[in-house]
Image (cartoon, rainbow, N blue to C red):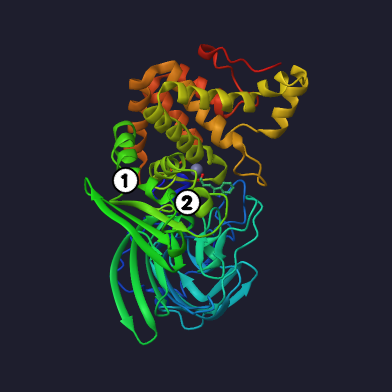
Amino acid sequence: MRRSGVPALAAAVVLASCTTSVTPVDLPPPDPTVAPPASTAVEEVIGEFGAPGIGDRLYPELGNGGYDVERYRLELEVGTDWSVNAVARIDLVPLENLSGFNLDLAGLDVESVEVEGFETVAFEHQSRELAVDLGGTAIAGVQISVTVGYSGTPRSVPADAVPFRPGWQQTDDLAYLFSQPDGAQSLFPVNDHPLDRADVSLAVTTPTGVEAVSGGTVVSESRGDSGDTVVWEMTDIAPYLIPLAIGQFTLASDRVVDGVRYDVWVSDDLVDLPAVDTFEIQPEVIAFFEQRFGPYPFDRAGALIVDDDLGAALETQTIPTYTATSARWGDVVIAHELAHQWFGDSIALEQWDDIWLNEGFATFAHWLWLEERFGFERYDSEVEAAYRTLSGIGLTESGVTPAVAADRVRAAFPPPDDPRASDLFNRSVYERGGLALVALRDAVGDEALFDLIRTYTQRYSGSSITTDAFLALVDEVLGDEPAALLTSWVVDVDIPALPGRGLVPPR
Ligand code: TRP
Ligand code: ZN
């Protein structure tokens, strides 16, 4: 599903160039209850093969063009050796007349690809692309169902963007997903980009005694000869935000507060970790954020805490994923991942290079939480520490000349809206992105700032956002001076001063 703030990119229904005369008419909306008339259209229209990438500026090869996924139905049978036997049924709507298209799938052995209504489907799986040749034309706007049978042992994928391999993580006792930005394809065939969100039903069968945990809502649980099966239903989710962990887990807490259910799942080995108790603070964090950001966008929150040492947490939708390492960071990281449920999950990116819209907001939010808990001085000291690093003040204080310090920070910290492809999660994205909102708060005050943020979440939740669209919103709600200020913080090469705080970059 694409509910984009930029209709031109999202709803481009392009008629393929073809030799027969086809009139570009307004296509009827897809009706999933009606069987696709694909077979009758084969002689009339010749489609083109969908583009191998979705059009991401930073990562042109990510995702796929030509279609929009509505739903993934995944059935995974997991073995004791972490091998999977799987069927993925994918309902997708062509955005143009298609002769075929790619899905992203890294590794694994594809055994079959079938498409309802197409008799002569062929496929080729190379590296990370599964190319499906329909042997006919799928008509723009008319949903088709693709069924992929596959098996193998999932492996995390290499990525330029991050200093580890995203996707399926495996230890002796545990497997889990940590997919940002493009690791969902380590487990299933997918349009692996946040621009194409979809509904997901995920059925996982595990050997008896092994538990699977995911997000959204559990719709069924059953025991069979081949193991235990749990089915989850997730709505409107980007592929990288699908939570999944398989191993020995305990439900440490399952409170319902103000209609939100807080399930805390913990690797059995970690149940006695004191950090697990910290998660009891979650309803307070959400109540605090709701006053500033507007209603919490889901009916579940919680935590999935896995016994691994990866040094990060991930804002998986409705149940963020923490490792033993990141869970120890306490309520700062909890606040950060919960803030992402508004910024990143409910409001999704259209382009990865706008990642500051996720991370800058989540950083600002966890600073606000620190202010709430420990007072304004704590917020202030976080802001100052970030500014000293990002501006180079810290360098000049240790004897570096201002000119050299300015050069070094220019090289190390690109502007938040322009991260390098090899360094998507640069500190600038987090901290100068957060400082941008601090500067805006300094300039317009709390009432105007949080009005803006509530307008933002109200207008864009369930949709996608770009930096340009956000700047236009700031202009509309707060006026052109605040919009210019924010632009200097996220777009300009050099970090601006924070005049109210006496913080000026070395030059
Ligand atoms: N998005 C995660 C967060 O901020 C962190 C994260 C995911 C990350 N992948 C990363 C950080 C790679 C650094 C590198 O909550
Ligand atoms: Zn984050």
> Total of numbered circles in the picture?
2
Q: Position of residue 182 (x, y in %)?
A: 56, 57
Q: Nearer the viewer, residue 197 or 340?
A: 340
As helix, strand or loop, the secondary structure at mark 1 comes to loop
Whichever of labels 2 and 1 marks the residue nearer the N terminus, that label is 2
Q: Is residue 50 visible?
A: no
Q: Is residue 119 above or below residue 364?
A: below
Quick one: quadrant of the N terminus? Answer: bottom left
Say which amino acid is labelled 2.
Leu
* Pointer 2 residue Cβ closer than 8 Å to ligand 1: no
Quarter of the image where one finds residue 305:
bottom left
Quick one: quadrant of the C terminus? Answer: top right
Q: Is residue 476 above or below residue 322?
A: above
Residue at x 48% of width, y 51% of height: 314
Residue at x 66% of width, y 52% of height: 160
Q: Is residue 282 above or below residue 165?
A: above
Q: Which residue extends farthest bottom?
A: 225
Q: Position of residue 501 (x, y in %)?
A: 52, 14
Residue at mark 2:
195
Q: Position of residue 128 (x, y in %)?
A: 62, 66
As helix, strand or loop, the secondary structure at mark 2 comes to loop
Residue at x 67% of width, y 47% of height: 422
Q: Nearer the viewer, residue 331 or 188?
A: 331
Residue at x 63% of width, y 50% of height: 161
Q: Position of residue 449 (x, y in %)?
A: 38, 24
Say which amino acid is labelled 1.
Pro
* Left or right of 263 on screen, residue 344: right
Crowding near the residue tagged with mark 1, few <14, some 14–19, many ≥20 C-alpha atoms within 10 Å? some
Of circles 2 and 1, the one toward us is 1
Residue at mark 1:
297
Crowding near the residue tagged with mark 2, few <14, some 14–19, many ≥20 C-alpha atoms within 10 Å? many
